Each structure stands twice: as structure tokens, then as C-alpha cells.
Amino acid sequence: MAQYRPVGSRTRWRRARALLASGLVLGVGAAVTLAAWNDSEHSSASFTAGQFGIVGAVNGTSFSEHPTQAATATMTFPATPMVPGTTSYALFSVRTINPSVAGTAQLTANAGNATGLGQYLTYGVRTITGTTCNATTFGSGTAVVTSGSALTTGAPAGTVQALQANSGNQVNYCFEVKLPAAAPNAAQSQQLTARWEVVATSAQP
């Protein structure tokens, strides 16, 4: 015999079954989310900075650091004392230290070079292939500062010399200094300690 259920009971039973069904669906969805798998990869890198530096020599072979005016390298111009018409030459060389990255060099002149005898002197600078600096090698060199320039004149902007890494090459500057034949009597007994600086800059990658 069929079991009789009141109408209200049948309605409540249908609602309960509907809630149970939805609960089962929600339960399955939650289980899928929690079962997701995970994986990852990690990376790292180490960095080391290089270094850049230059050294100089007045004889083309004995290189050392001269980082300040107090520790300057003294060039020797043989034709001294100077008289009108005198021309004298001297060498200054630079290269990178080892180890060092590559770079460029630019010659600059001190404003104080215009004092004393410097107001009457003129000069020029050329790079030469060897370390013998004289009238002959100067004449065949590459101009850095035009001959006849004031001693306060440095290399023009953009006029630089290449410096290879790790002492790979050296730049030999040949200086030519003149006391012109027309130098006045006021130049007599005047003195000057002229100063130049080679400003080196590391190369961009």
C-alpha cells in the first residue's frame, strides 16, 4: 500500500532534496579548486664591476700613476733656458692599467699656463707612433693641438685618443714648445711651470 504523505511534508521533502543536490554540486566545485597543481622556476645572477685607470710616463717606458698636480710627471724640454726662436720637444705617454676596461684620452691645458713666461710661449701637440719625440717625429704625427697655440689651449672637443683595455696600447704625445723669434724683452728671465692633464674616460659598452 502506498505510503501517504501530507502535502506539506511532500513540499518540504522536495526542497530538502533540492538543497542536497546543490550542496553536492558545490562540494564537487570546491574539490576541483583545491586539487590544482603548482610548480615554479627560480633564477639568480651575480654581478661584478670592472675598473678603469691610466698611468703615464715621460720616457715612454716607466709608467706610474700621477693622479694630482702634487704628484705630477715632469717632462724635460732640453732646450732651456729659452731664447727667441727656440723650439723644444718632450714626450708624455699614457696607457690603461692592467686590468682595466678600454676608454679614451683627451688632453687639457691649465689656465695658469698663461702666466709668467707662458704668455710669450706657443706650443703644439701631436701623437706619434714611437717614443722618440723630436722635430722629425712631430712633423709626421697626428695633430692634437695645433702648432702655434697658446699654452692654455687643450685638444678640441671630440679630439680623443683610443685606449685599449689592459695596457693594450699606449698613446704617445709629442709636445713642441716655442719661444717665437719676435718675443719681446719683457720675456727675459720669466719663468713658468706649465701643466697639462690627460682626462681619460672609460668606453661605453
Image (cartoon, rainbow, N blue to C red):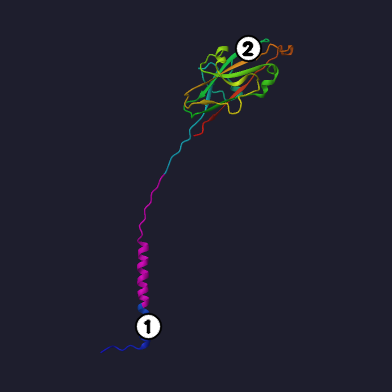
Q: Nearer the viewer, mark 2 or mark 1?
A: 2
Relative to 31, does residue 104 appear above or below in the rendering? above
The residue drawn where x is 48% and y is 22% is 169
Relative to 137, does residue 99 appear above or below in the rendering? below
Q: Secondary structure at mark 1?
A: helix
The residue drawn where x is 74% and y is 11% is 185
Q: Is residue 54 left or right of residue 7?
A: right
Q: Main secondary structure of the magenta part?
A: helix
Q: Position of residue 19 (x, y in %)?
A: 37, 76
Residue 104 shows in this picture: yes
Q: Position of residue 116 (x, y in %)?
A: 70, 17
Q: Is residue 191 left or right of residue 107?
A: right
Amino acid at dot 2:
Thr
Q: According to the image, label 2 marks what residue?
A: 87
Residue 76 shows in this picture: no
The span shown in magenta is: 18-43
Q: Nearer the viewer, residue 90 or 61?
A: 90
Judge the density around disc 2: few (<14), some (14-19), many (≥20) Cα neighbours within 10 Å. many
Image quarter of the N terminus: bottom left
Q: According to the image, label 1 marks what residue?
A: 12
Amino acid at dot 1:
Arg
The residue drawn where x is 70% and y is 20% is 115
Q: Position of residue 18 (x, y in %)?
A: 36, 77
Q: Secondary structure at mark 2?
A: strand
2 or 1: tag closer to the N-terminus: 1
Judge the density around disc 1: few (<14), some (14-19), many (≥20) Cα neighbours within 10 Å. few
The residue drawn where x is 37% and y is 63% is 33
Q: Nearer the viewer, residue 36 or 175?
A: 175
Question: To which quarter of the image does residue 141 belong?
Answer: top right
Residue 56 falls within the magenta-colored stretch: no
